[in-house]
Amino acid sequence: MTETKSDSRRGVRALITAVIRFFGDVVILGLWVLFLTLLFLSTGWPIWAFYGLLLLGVAVYVSITASWFGSSSS
């Protein structure tokens, strides 16, 4: 089977979307980690609370953003 131009464009578009989403996730989660690190260094709160809030924040972020992009398989 031969691949048409529209299939090729769709594949490139999907790749670009995935790369943008990946870097967006890295930036947002990195800012969350930075915020928590600075907060906990300045307040002296316990380390277990840091890890709890870190995991909670990542879980909330994933649960919110997971529904933004549906499955692309047909």
Image (tube, rainbow, N blue to C red):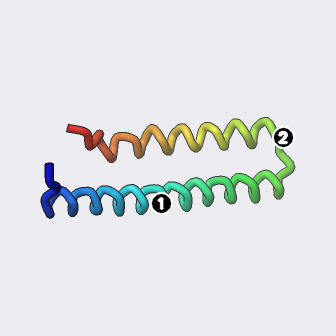
Q: Nearer the viewer, residue 40 or 66?
A: 66
Decide if residue 66 is on the left or right side of residue 30: left
In the rendered view, would you say 55 is above or below 37? above
Q: Quadrant of residue 28?
A: bottom right
| Quarter of the rendering containing residue 9 | bottom left
| Amino acid type, callout 1 | Gly
Residue bearing the label numbered 1:
24
Query: Which tag, 2 or 1, sits closer to the chain's start?
Result: 1
The residue most toward the front is: 1
Q: Position of residue 52 (x, y in %)?
A: 70, 36
**In the structure shown, which secondary structural element does the residue marked by tag 2 occupy?**
loop
Q: Nearer the viewer, mark 2 or mark 1?
A: 1
Residue position for label 2: 46
Q: Position of residue 67 (x, y in %)?
A: 34, 40
**Rendered position, 27 above or below 1:** below
Task: Pick out the residue farthest to the right.
Answer: 44
Circle 1 Cα neighbour tier, 10 Å, few/some/many (<14 / 14–19 / ≥20): few
Q: Horizontal placement of 25 versus 38: left or right?
A: left
Q: Residue at x 29, y 41 (%)?
A: 70
Element type at mark 1:
helix
Q: Residue at x 79, y 36 (%)?
A: 48
Kind of residue indicated by mark 2? Pro
Quarter location, residue 34: bottom right
Q: How far apart in space, not on screen, are marks 2 and 1 (Cα)?
A: 29 Å
Question: In the image shown, does 61 or 5 lie closer to the viewer?
Answer: 5
Can you give x and y, in whole percent of width and height, for residue 73 in the image?
25, 39
Q: Is residue 12 left or right of residue 1?
A: right
Determine the residue positioned at 67% across, 58% down: 35
Residue 3: mark: none
- Callout 2: 10 Å neighbours few (<14), some, many (20+)? few
Classify 67 as above or below 30: above
